[in-house]
């Protein structure tokens, strides 16, 4: 969980991040990030940064769980607060 939060925090601090700059990730994780989470592409959010999109989702899903691991559960609201530090 700590590694994920560290990576997420790094991404949130830099608007124009490149996947290769995130540090070491497994090939499996890279495929998940690049392919599995790709979803449907639209021109709708081309003018928004990752941070804008995350905050928008966090506002819509405040009380829903954003992260779960063996010891912690973090809502979108909490995650937004953590990454805003």
Image (cartoon, rainbow, N blue to C red):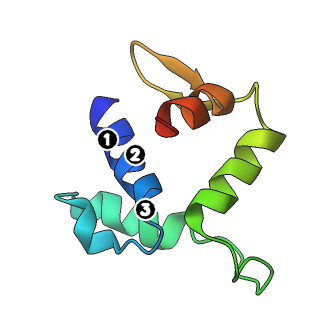
Q: Residue at x 60, y 69 (%)?
A: 49
Residue 24 in picture, x, y percent from top left: 16, 58
Which-is-in-front pick, marks 3 and 1? 1
Disc 2/disc 1 C-alpha distance (Å): 5 Å
Q: Are marks 3 and 1 in contact (CB under 8 Å)?
A: no
Q: Residue at x 33, y 71 (%)?
A: 19
Position of 23 compared to 12: left or right?
A: left
Q: Which residue is mark 1?
A: 6
Which-is-in-front pick, marks 3 and 2? 2
Q: Residue at x 68, y 73 (%)?
A: 48
Residue 27 vertical position relative to residue 71 in the rendered view, above or below: below
Residue 4 vertical position relative to residue 65 in the rendered view, above or below: below
Disc 3/disc 1 C-alpha distance (Å): 18 Å
Of the pair 62 and 70, the residue shown nearer to us: 62
Q: Secondary structure at mark 3?
A: helix
Q: Which residue is mark 2?
A: 9
Q: Residue at x 71, y 41 (%)?
A: 58
Q: Secondary structure at mark 2?
A: helix
Of the pair 15 and 21, the residue shown nearer to us: 15
Residue 57 in picture, x, y percent from top left: 74, 49
Q: Which mark is residue 32?
A: 3
Q: Residue 53, located in which quarter of the rendered image?
A: bottom right
Q: Are marks 2 and 1 in contact (CB under 8 Å)?
A: yes
Marks counted in the figure total 3
Residue 31 in picture, x, y percent from top left: 37, 68
Question: Is disc 2 surrounded by few (<14), some (14 to 19) or many (20+) residues within 10 Å?
Answer: some
């Amino acid at each position: 969980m700590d590694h994920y939060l560290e990576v997420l925090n790094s991404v949130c601090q830099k608007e124009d991040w490149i996947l290769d700059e995130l540090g070491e990730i497994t090939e499996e994780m890279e495929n998940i990030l690049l392919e599995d989470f790709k979803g449907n592409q639209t021109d709708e959010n081309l003018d928004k940064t990752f941070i804008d999109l995350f905050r928008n989702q966090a506002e819509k899903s405040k009380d829903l769980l954003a992260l779960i691991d063996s010891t912690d559960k973090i809502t979108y609201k909490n995650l937004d607060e953590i990454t805003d530090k």
